């Protein structure tokens, strides 16, 4: 019987797709098959990202494989995958922080504000991912990447980073719209107009304090009238103007809280400012002053106006203080 030599290599060699694989002592060996349909191109800056979690990378790959218009909100993704809403929300925040996901607010033709989600196959300038130094196999085209099977293919027009399709003879579309490589055009942000309310003629501190206390208690009559400290400070002069015109606190409170609309108040401070301005009562009628004749003081002979002869106000005050002093000295 011949002796066996287990150290002799086997004559059978591994054949993969008719090619001899490269010799490696350990690690992964790629068995690649060329895809001709239903594939998505993923950059190695995403697949080999050093800071993104594995869940975030997988979620980015899934989103990039979806056709345009697919829902990628947290509820839809949580129903699709077993990770749960909290983990998916964290992964979406990672992608947004590194520039692979953008949320753009746009105004619809009917005036409503909608949010559009942009999936970027290249990170935007605000969160560009570092490139890894791992060697990658060259692929036809100007970019290097990993081709993954599954998802939206060329029939959806979602194959990124292609200069042209030689089989279809089509060129990439460069239409207008939000882009991931730069800042998208956003509608101008409206700043709320300053609250204009009536101003009191004599803004005494006690009057403004009473107006502030009245505004701070309006939420007890309707929770929708809960005001911030800044709104209360802006509205206090308007309430003070009402109190100055002989409108008591209960009258002002009734004017501000009566007949409120049933729908939610988006800006309660602006609503109250409108009521304070539109329903401002007229100034209080001041009594006509009677011109009393001039009198001479019986003690200092100074002239003063009074309905009857007597002493002036200064002499009355002096007499009152003298009486109080005598009363304190008397045992």
Image (spheres, rainbow, N blue to C red):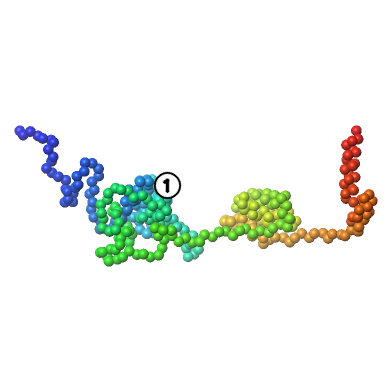
110 versus 66 height, above or below: below
Residue at image location 25% in from the left, 43% down from the top:
27
Q: Which quadrant holds residue 143?
A: bottom left
Within-10-Å neighbours for mark 1: few <14, some 14–19, many 20+:
some
Q: Residue furthest left?
A: 1
Residue 138 horizontal/vertical position (percent): 25, 54
Residue 22 horizontal/vertical position (percent): 19, 47
Please give the residue where the numbered disc 1 appears in the rendered image. Answer: 90
Residue at image location 66% in from the left, 51% down from the top:
215
69 sits left or right of 260 in the view: left
Residue at image location 12% in from the left, 38% down from the top:
8
Considering depth in this image, is 63 or 20 the residue closer to the camera? 20
Count the numbered circles shown.
1
Residue at image location 32% in from the left, 64% down from the top:
172
Quadrant location, the N terminus: top left
Q: Which quadrant holds residue 195?
A: bottom right
Considering depth in this image, is 148 or 22 the residue closer to the camera? 22
Answer whether residue 229 is visible to the viewer in this image.
Answer: yes
Answer whether residue 112 is visible to the viewer in this image.
Answer: no
Quadrant location, the C terminus: top right
Residue 112 horizontal/vertical position (percent): 49, 61
314 sits left or right of 1 in the view: right
Q: Residue furthest bottom?
A: 169
Residue 41 horizontal/vertical position (percent): 31, 55
Considering depth in this image, is 233 or 305 the residue closer to the camera? 305
Q: Dot 1 lies on which element?
A: helix
Considering depth in this image, is 185 or 318 the residue closer to the camera? 318
């Amino acid at each position: 019987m011949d002796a066996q030599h287990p150290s002799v290599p086997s004559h059978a060699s591994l054949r993969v797709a008719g090619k001899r694989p490269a010799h490696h002592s350990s690690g992964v060996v790629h068995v690649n098959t060329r895809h001709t349909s239903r594939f998505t191109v993923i950059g190695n800056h995403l697949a080999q990202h050093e800071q993104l979690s594995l869940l975030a990378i997988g979620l980015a790959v899934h989103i990039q494989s979806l056709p345009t218009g697919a829902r990628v909100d947290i509820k839809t993704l949580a129903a699709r995958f077993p990770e749960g809403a909290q983990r998916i929300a964290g992964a979406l925040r990672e992608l947004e922080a590194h520039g692979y996901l953008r949320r753009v607010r746009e105004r619809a033709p009917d005036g409503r504000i909608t949010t559009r989600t942009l999936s970027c196959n290249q990170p935007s300038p605000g969160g560009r991912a570092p490139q890894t130094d791992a060697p990658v196999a060259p692929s036809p085209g100007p970019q290097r990447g990993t081709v993954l099977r599954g998802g939206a293919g060329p029939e959806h027009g979602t194959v990124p980073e292609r200069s042209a399709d030689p089989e279809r003879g089509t060129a990439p579309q460069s239409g207008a719209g939000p882009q991931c490589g730069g800042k998208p055009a956003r509608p101008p942000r409206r700043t709320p107009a300053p609250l204009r309310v009536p101003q009191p003629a004599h803004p005494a501190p006690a009057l403004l304090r009473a107006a502030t206390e009245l505004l701070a208690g309006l939420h007890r009559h309707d929770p929708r009238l809960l005001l911030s400290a800044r709104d209360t400070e802006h509205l206090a002069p308007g309430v003070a103007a009402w109190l100055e015109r002989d409108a008591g606190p209960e009258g002002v409170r009734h004017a501000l809280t009566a007949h409120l609309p049933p729908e939610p108040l988006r800006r309660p401070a602006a609503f109250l400012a409108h009521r304070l301005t539109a329903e401002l009562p007229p100034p209080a009628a001041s009594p006509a002053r009677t011109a009393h004749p001039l009198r001479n003081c019986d003690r200092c002979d100074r002239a003063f106006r009074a309905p009857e002869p007597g002493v002036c106000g200064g002499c009355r005050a002096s007499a009152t203080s003298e009486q109080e002093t005598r009363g304190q000295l008397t045992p």
